[in-house]
Image (cartoon, grey):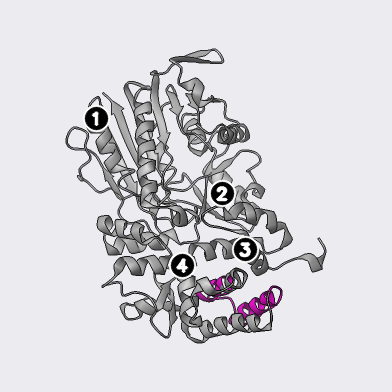
Amino acid sequence: MALRDIQTARTIAIEVLNQFDPKRNYAGPILDKLLDKTNERQRATDLVFGTIRNRLAIDAVIAKFSRCPVERIPAKLLNILRVGAYELIYSPSTAEYSIVDEAAQNAKAVAGKKQVGFVNAVLRQIARLTTNRQSTLTPTNVTRTLPQTPTTGCEFAIPFLPDPQAFPADYLSVAFSLPKWLVADWLAEFGFTKVWQICLASNRRPSIYIRPNTLKITTQQLAEKLHQADTNAEIVPDGALIRTKSPREIIQLPGFAEGEFTVQDISSAQAVRFLKPKPHWRILDLCAAPGVKTTQLAEATADSAKIIATDIDTERLKLVEENISRLGIKSVRTIPYEQLLNSKFKILHSTFAIDSFDCVLLDVPCSNTGVLAKRIEARYRLKPDTIKQLTETQRDLLRTAAKMVKPQGKICYSTCSIQKEENGELVKNFLLQNPDFHLEFENLILPSAEFADIVNSRKPEVRGLARPSSIVHCPSWRAADHDGGYVAILVNR
């Protein structure tokens, strides 16, 4: 590509936002098509995802300091303002003059002199009324400071956020760009302090964790291999995962093509670890795509279990096959979902009865409220009715799984949600309706921006219904930021 054809990260970010509709499409595929036009790939990615994550807060700032509702600002100018405001607020090390000047240049390409002047004036006003781009968070500046980290925020000269004491849901909704109904739901269950932490974690720049393929390489060997390639790699305390940071894409890291690792968050890895699968088990992964937990099952059983992977989405089932192939796994077979519903089915030389599994892994479709930092569009699509529809699907899948485990067999039910309707309440209702099952263990992990709070791991006291009895501290979750999720282990009596 000729030097004159290379575009800046800001220009790419604005172009992505111009094509992006949070309720209809996804930013990632749009960005992927444009990244080759810039040599600032990582920065462009941060600008796109950061602006989308924080859009409600950014719009509140723009509206306040422009004295113009964002609905009245032309879309292309608004996206220029959003990218500029994002950097002014959330990238305090970036020089103000470069942010404002390039925004004006980008405005010239799509608008007339008057509109260019408007963009320039709004961003300069935001900069002028910013008293500290990285101030310590205190109770006295809370209504004029947008949080950036657990301890810092961008402080303005005048208040513009709702009072968190009088209107906690309104404050958290605007400050963290989350649906008010969702924040109110969290407040009713967890309380303000913990919800503040959840909201902050939902807007963080998430770390990337990778799970070494222990069939091929040890964690230490992989970490050393990454270090030799000048890639930052930190082994989490329990030694099971590696936190990595690199300007290169994951697929370009050493070991990826050789199948030596898989990307997986700390919270996602817990379901299989709590299950503790055995090499002699017959295991069914009922919602397997894209195969992250499927391959974890194979690695945890030394590639010696008999694992069946299926998914109702046949196209996404191909992703499982791709992961199996790349990792060199032999113990997993994929089958179409319809074939699974037969009373008996045959794969290669083995015949499986539908109710013969030692375990069913059920990683159900969910609201994604534990992974909002990564699945950035979800916050704009979620509605209370969405949760209701999802729980109906989850109940149906759990009933299906119950028919497939043999006596003393287990269901490992997991979500990447932190909603009680999709987790503890759903499991409790299932146990009431299915007395043949009891609850062995359940665990709710809340998303964290840095250090994990107390993790609510509970063992049941009465007839398999979860009741708080103990708190388990898990040092491995104190390494850094992580997503949220839920796991329950149900046993067929």
Residue 86 within the magenta-colored segment of the rendering = yes
Residue to which mark 2 is pinned = 223
Instruction: Name the image quarter holding residue 108.
Output: bottom right
Q: Earlier in the sequence, mark 3 or mark 1?
A: 3
What is the x, y in percent for residue 134?
46, 77
Measuring 69% from the left and 80% from the top, which residue is drawn there?
112
Residue to which mark 3 is pinned = 18
Measuring 29% from the left and 37% from the top, which residue is drawn there?
427
Q: Earlier in the sequence, mark 1 or mark 4?
A: 4
The span from disc 3 to disc 4 (Cα, nearest Å) is 17 Å
Horizontally, residue 100 falls left or right of residue 426, namely: right
Q: Secondary structure at mark 2?
A: helix
Q: Nearer the viewer, mark 3 or mark 1?
A: 3
Residue to which mark 4 is pinned = 56
80 or 155, which is in the foreground?
80
> In the image, what residue type sits under mark 3?
Asn
Q: Earlier in the sequence, mark 3 or mark 4?
A: 3
Q: Earlier in the sequence, mark 2 or mark 4?
A: 4
Measuring 34% from the left and 64% from the top, which residue is drawn there?
196
What is the x, y in percent for residue 345?
49, 15
Q: Secondary structure at mark 1?
A: helix
Q: Nearer the viewer, mark 2 or mark 4?
A: 4
